[in-house]
Amino acid sequence: MTSIDIGNDKLNGELKSAQFFDADKFPTATYKGTSMKFKGDVPVEVIGELTLHGVTKPLNLKIESFKCFTNPMLKKEVCGTESTATFDRGDFGVDYGKAYGFKMKTTLHIQAEGVKQ
């Protein structure tokens, strides 16, 4: 969370502060996938856990797209994915703004690429 940068220094500071993500105490957020679900041979969901603000909870990612191909420069198979999950950030103790009517619903977008070794 220490690397948050939304293009506004003042808001970056607010998001890193103790009243929001408390980045000094919780410098990272981590998603750890433990298994995958497939439809045929196509991955459709990652089963895993999100750790945010010192709280770990189950969170499954819906795989929006997944593609593998031989990279012409690397001459190796590479795969890429775009995945999403929606959660209530208040469940992780990040509830700043709730008293003002801010929505706690948050969507996590993950893009990942890998090279077959």
Image (cartoon, rainbow, N blue to C red):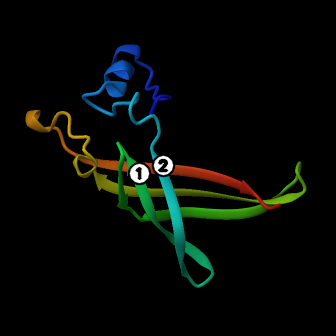
Q: Nearer the viewer, residue 35 or 37?
A: 35
- Distance CA(mark 2)–CA(mark 1): 5 Å
Q: Which residue is mark 1?
A: 51
Percent across and percent down for residue 19 are 24, 28
Q: Is residue 67 above or below residue 89?
A: below
Report the residue at 36% width, 19% height from top. Answer: 13
| Residue 14 % position (x, y) | 31, 22
**In the rendered image, which residue does mark 2 sit on?**
30
Residue 55 percent coordinates (x, y): 34, 50
Question: Number of callouts in the render?
Answer: 2
Specify the amino acid type for callout 1.
Thr
Left/right of residue 90 with respect to residue 110 in the rendered view = left
- Secondary structure beneath dot 1 equals strand
- For marks 2 and 1, the one nearer the N-term is 2
- How packed mark 2 is, by other alpha carbons closer than 10 Å (few <14, some 14-19, many 20 or more), is few
Q: Secondary structure at mark 2?
A: strand
Tell me which corner region of the image, top left, top right, bottom left or bottom right, holds residue 101.
Answer: top left
Identity of the residue furthest to the top in this view: 10
Amino acid type, label 2: Thr
Q: Depth check: 26 or 83 in front?
A: 26
Residue sitting at 44 percent across and 56 percent down? Answer: 84
Q: What's the residue at 29%, 27% (across, down)? A: 18
Give left or right: position of 58 versus 90: right
